[in-house]
């Protein structure tokens, strides 16, 4: 009855494909799309139905580019981080972006910080749950 301990383990017959972290089209396209969305959103919040100015355009371009670069950098290094720090990094990035957009409406720094922290805490919980339940 102890035959299960002596059974040979299954061996993989094919070689594993090399890991391609950060080199897929999605790893480049997703931060770019998110940066464009955040840039347009910041531009339209600042515009507020009035005439378009160069400062509003630069605000949208710079904020979108900064968010896209930060998002791409986080995606590139995420597997080198432990799951808690990875979830905190995604929470900080999301909370910072939402707090920044909320502050463009003319809200106070305290209200923008509170909204950003709330969103960051929610994103931390979601990402930690996803990483905790899906990692080996």
Image (spheres, rainbow, N blue to C red):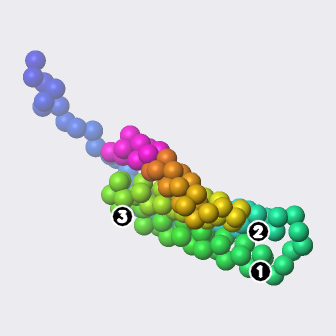
* The residue positioned farthest toward the left in the image shown: 2
Label 1 CA crowd tier, 10 Å (few <14, some 14–19, many 20+): few
136 in relation to 8, above or below: below
Q: Is residue 2 magenta?
A: no
Displayed quadrant of residue 35: bottom right
Which residue is at 42% across, 66% downward? 77
Say if residue 97 shows up in the picture. Answer: no
Residue 46, which numbered label? Answer: 2
Nearer-N-terminus badge (3/1): 1
Label at residue 80: 3
Q: Nearer the viewer, residue 16 or 64?
A: 64
Q: Which residues are magenta?
A: 125-136
Relative height, residue 118 to residue 9 (above, below): below
| 26 sits left or right of 60 in the view | left
Mark 3 to mark 2 CA distance (whole Å): 37 Å
- The residue mark sitting in front, 3 or 2, is 2
Answer whether labels 1 and 2 touch (C-beta < 8 Å): yes
Image coords of residue 70 (percent x, y): 53, 70
Q: Which residue is nearer to you in this view: 129 or 2?
A: 129
Image quarter where the N terminus lies is top left
Residue at mark 1? 55
Badge 2 local density, few (<14 within 10 Å), some, or many (20+)? many
Q: Residue at x 76, y 68 (%)?
A: 46
- First in sequence: mark 3 or mark 2? 2
Residue 1 seen in the current view: yes
Magenta segment main secondary structure: helix
């Amino acid at each position: 009855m102890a035959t299960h301990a002596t059974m040979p383990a299954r061996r993989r017959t094919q070689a594993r494909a090399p890991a391609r972290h950060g080199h897929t089209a999605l790893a480049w396209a997703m931060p770019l799309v998110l940066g464009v969305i955040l840039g347009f959103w910041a531009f339209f919040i600042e515009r507020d139905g009035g005439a378009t100015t160069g400062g509003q355009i630069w605000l949208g371009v710079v904020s979108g580019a900064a968010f896209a670069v930060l998002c791409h950098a986080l995606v590139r290094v995420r597997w080198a981080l432990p799951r808690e720090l990875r979830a905190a990094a995604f929470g900080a990035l999301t909370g910072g972006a939402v707090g920044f957009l909320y502050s463009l409406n003319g809200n106070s720094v305290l209200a923008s910080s509170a909204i950003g922290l709330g969103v960051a805490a929610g994103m931390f919980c979601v990402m930690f749950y996803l990483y905790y339940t899906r990692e080996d």
